[in-house]
Image: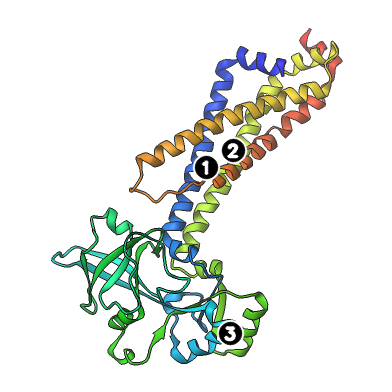
Amino acid sequence: MFLALRELRHAKLRYLLIGFIMVLIAWLVLFVTGLAQGLSSDNASSIQNMKADYLVLQEESDHRINRSILTEELWNEVQRHPDGNDATPLGVHMNTLTKEGSTAKFDAAFFAIDVQSMLAPKVVEGTMISNTDTDHVMADRSLKDDGYRLGDRIVDQATGAAFTIAAFTEGQSFSHAPVIHINFEEWKALLPSSAKQVPIYSAVALNGSPEQIEALAREVSGIEIMTKDEALQGIPGFKEEQGSLIMMIVFLFVIAAFVLAVFFYVITIQKMNQFGVLKAIGAGTGYLVRNLIFQVLTLTIISLAISIGLTYGVSLLLSGIVPFSLPPSVVLLCSLLFLAVSLMGSLLSLYRVIKIDAIEAIGRAA
């Protein structure tokens, strides 16, 4: 390690430039990853945070909750499998609303639930509504950030139904719109007049063993059962949005590997004579390889530390402007991947160091 540190100090400008490039690449990887995580949460956090493992939709709904219509009869059949306590209906409806007394419009997703069930969201401000309320709702706190307060009245543009915000929830969005939770009494106000007398639902949330789920799929016709991850793929734009961002992240890692490989290979070629002389005076190949790996790891770790600080700093500046989420577990995963990519990029240089012929190198140096 002595040789590696001496070389880093001797060629400061060269390694500073390499470190700067690594900081920019790592920063871009982390920022795009945080953006992907933030957009995923903004698009589907209501589904991701559900305390259910499976969703039952109408057959041939293409995994899209908003296309599914389940009748009361189907709900009763599903409820008997597996345990009735592990199944609860869900109604989903995208609407345009306004604040009472205002003409400003916003889109929201109504989620009709049994507020005593596993689908009840966590209330961060206000009071949980009951199953008998007729005009109180719980709204995602993103509406609070937009200026809405407890007690404000919101009006559905399609039906004219008005509701009072009784509570704010957290982490509840669907298709990039805040989720407003209501009970099934209020759900009726959003249904067409022909459907008010016969309850209809969009989905049924389930918990159960794989065997129970398979038995349900066999015994009840007219339904399809999917995991939450499969349901996420059915949210409009979710798969395309995440696919594009993940592809960008993958390409950034590939670019990082090539850039680092070129930089360290060029530096290694420039030092071939010195490596040959060191071998001639007794330095082993393992010693030279360890020094090169130490240089790569040192530059990568320092660059990652700077990049993580820059990423979180920029995320604070953009808070509320763009959806951004970068939990420590994701940072750790990206950092490990970047370390692996850096080491992969140095393989070509390691090969050249291993293949150095001391006599030939001394001849060139002479």
Query: Mark 2 to mark 3: distance in Å?
Result: 51 Å
Examine the rendered structure and indicate whether residue 133 appears above or below residue 28.
Answer: below
Residues 78 and 268: in front is 78
Residue at point 65% right, 29% down? 297
* Outermost left residue: 101
Q: Would residue 110 be seen by someone viewing this image from the given angle?
A: yes
Upstream in sequence: badge 2 or badge 1: 1
Q: Which residue is mark 1?
A: 29
Amino acid on which the number 2 mark rests in the picture: Ala
Cα–Cα gap, marks 2 and 1: 10 Å
Assess whether mark 1 and mark 2 are in contact (beta carbons under 8 angstroms): yes
Residue kind at label 3, given as amino acid type: His
Residue matched to label 3? 81
> Regarding mark 3 in the picture, which secondary structure is present there?
loop
Residue 360, percent from left and from top: 84, 16
Label whose residue precedes the other's in the sequence (2 or 3): 3
Rendered-image quadrant of the C terminus: top right
Q: Which residue is mark 2?
A: 256
Quarter of image, res 42: bottom left
